[in-house]
Amino acid sequence: MINAAAAALPWEKLEDRNILVTGATGLIGGCLVDILMANRERSYHVFAAGRDEKRAHARFARYWHDERFHFIKFDVSEPLAGDAVFHYIIHAASNASPVFFAKSPVEIIKSNVYGTANLIDYGRNHGMERFLYVSSGEIYGQGTGEKAFTETDSGYVDCATPRACYPSSKRAAETLCVAYAEEYGVDAVIVRPSHTYGPHFTGSDNRVFCQFIRNVLRGEDIVMKSDGSQMRSWCYVADCALAMLYVLLNGERGNAYNIADTSSVFSIREMAETLAHQAGRKVVFAIPEDAEKKVFTKISYAVFATDKLEALGWKPLAGNWQQKLNTTIREEMDKTDLG
């Protein structure tokens, strides 16, 4: 995180500012907090928000008592109370784990739509300077052929399914951001991360890379429940969080930006086989249960163009995706709760 914190960004824009990060105990939100706290020249305050104080304390133990770090316990689906001024609000609170798409689709929609409205309304009344919404590459849905998505593209999403709770509410929240910008002059920007991997995922996270890494750490073969042919853009979590800061500080108001590592385009099966090879295991296939099939995405090709992001000055940190997977495994080996 030190390398990311040393990025050539206009850090002076954050001087003496308060930065609120929702979803701070999640994969991306937590990494963003780490980068902000790793900046040795920081003169700003970081407010990490989440619903679980115990998890937050464990995640941020090394600077829990730092005078410039603060934890706020709240659920973004409810209005934020108080009079604190948050100059920058980064809304990264949204469960991206497929298991919850089946169990809690209503809550996922609320965290995206209600959460966005609640935070922007609070910010409008309390000196907010910029709002960053963390959307998802899933908003593109299923495209046609094998073409990289640019920020102006739109593919098919079947809205009349519970699985659509995630991409549909992300789309609605994006529209809400630009509506606030148009009607009330809110300075809002949007990021659309691709499939993101890295350390510090939660025990309940059942995205494929989390499941594969748990298999490896338990000395098991990697279990796949599809043929793994789906092609994806991927991004290491530190690269993703750093990209968010480039958009926060350099992005153009009202614009959306894809986040992906263009050197990390590979299938889910390729990730599984790479991890299995590194661990001396093999990939095995299992028939998924009906409940699992309900949360499978039907998107076969999700590759993103990043020219717009790169024009802001962002580029991935050094190292290829295999090396970054190794880093993820090493950091996860120190954890005792694998879920």
Image (tube, rainbow, N blue to C red):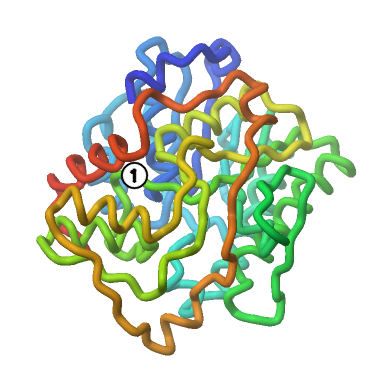
- Which residue is at the front of the view, 104 or 166? 166
Q: Is residue 174 above or below residue 30?
A: below
Task: State how many labels appear.
Answer: 1
Q: Position of residue 51 (x, y in %)?
A: 41, 57
Q: Is residue 327 above or below residue 74?
A: above
Q: Residue furthest right?
A: 183
Residue 89 shown left or right of residue 203 in the figure? right
The amino acid at mark 1 is Gly
Which quadrant is the C terminus positioned in? bottom left
Q: Position of residue 281 (x, y in %)?
A: 15, 60
- Which residue is at the front of the view, 79 or 339? 339
Give the residue drawn at x 63%, y 35%.
306
Q: Residues within 10 Å of mark 1 (few under 14, many from 20)?
A: many
Q: Position of residue 163 (x, y in %)?
A: 58, 75
Give the residue drawn at x 62%, y 45%.
304
Q: Position of residue 160 (x, y in %)?
A: 70, 81
Residue 75 shown left or right of residue 132 in the figure? left
Residue 305 shown left or right of residue 208 in the figure? right
- Which residue is at the front of the view, 92 or 276? 276
Is residue 78 something that shows in the picture?
no
Residue 238 shown left or right of residue 233 in the figure? left
Secondary structure, mark 1, is loop
Which quadrant is the N terminus positioned in? top left
Q: Is residue 192 above or below residue 293?
A: above
Residue occupied by mark 1: 198
Give the residue drawn at x 21%, y 60%.
214
Is residue 29 something that shows in the picture?
yes
Give the residue drawn at x 34%, y 84%.
287
